[in-house]
Amino acid sequence: MSRVTFVAGKLGTWRIESIAAICGEGVGPAERLERIEAPQFLSPPEGGWRLCGVRSNERYTEKSERERLIAIQPPLDRMESVCASLIPIKKSEAWWALAQDERRRLFEERSKHLSIGIEYLPAVARRLYHSRDLGEAFDFLTWFEFAEKDASAFDELLRRLRDTEEWSYVEREVEIRLRRDRARD
Ligand code: HEM
């Protein structure tokens, strides 16, 4: 199982520019953040906080969709990706009470999550982590990286997704915007 810890405190590659509680309770303030994929979870830093998740199998992606994604999705840690966003999300009990096929229908047929998202590839690189089965406060930790010039496209993507029926099941969402001081060497 591939584990991730997002550690927010005084240290880290990413400078926290803003933390906005979009829906429900926010998270505490911090100066910097690091995303660490490692065999074990890391401890919370002094005076800061951490969020834990795991990479997991896909739930809703069909074969042809996966092939489209694989063909176009960029890797994380590109040189030009000086902007990033960590968006932890919790969905309601009503969502989790639905059957798998109802959730798939809401996710794609009714809300077009993947169809909308794919329009923003390869500008936006993404990684989805699952937290619900760890008993964490959020169900998902979503991570995105992009170049400065694509920041407004990312804002538009967020607006479009938050307007969907799928998002009516989101009961807690925090948008953390990050920047690294300069492009990677
Ligand atoms: C950048 C373009 C995006 C693409 C191509 C994309 C694509 C996908 C795909 C294919 C899945 C399903 C994975 C599976 O089969 O289990 C997924 C799940 C998810 N995405 Fe996105 N996404 C994008 C942007 C976003 C954004 C901006 C957010 C948050 C604001 C987000 C939040 C989520 C969440 C929370 C899930 C898990 C849904 C669930 O399992 O109930 N995605 N995304």
Image (cartoon, rainbow, N blue to C red):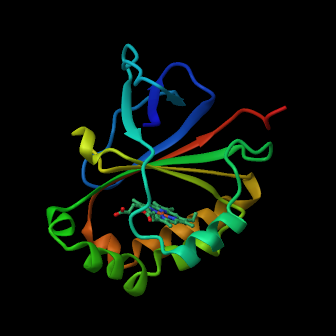
| Residue in the image at 64% along x and 73% along y | 68
Residue 137 visible in the snapshot: no
Instruction: Name the residue: 67% across, 61% down.
Output: 73
Q: Is residue 181 left or right of residue 22?
A: right
Q: Position of residue 103 (x, y in %)?
A: 29, 74
| Camera-nearest residue between 157 and 30 | 157
Direction right: furthest residue = 185
Q: Could you say where residue 183 lies in the image, as x and y percent from the top left?
A: 79, 38
What residue is at 38 percent from the left and 86 percent from the top? 110
- Say if residue 121 shows up in the picture: yes
Depth check: give the residue in front, 80 or 22: 80
Q: Quadrant of the C terminus?
A: top right
Placement of the N terminus among the 4 image quadrants? top left
75 in relation to 100, above or below: above
View extreme (bottom): residue:
109
Q: Position of residue 137 (x, y in %)?
A: 25, 42
Rendered view: 88 above or below 152: above
Quadrant in which residue 184 is drawn: top right
Residue 125 vs 80, above or below: the answer is below
Is 145 displayed left or right of 177 in the figure? right
Looking at the picture, does residue 178 appear above or below residue 110? above
Tell me residue 78's x, y (percent).
76, 45
Q: Residue furthest front?
A: 63
Q: Is residue 98 left or right of residue 90?
A: left
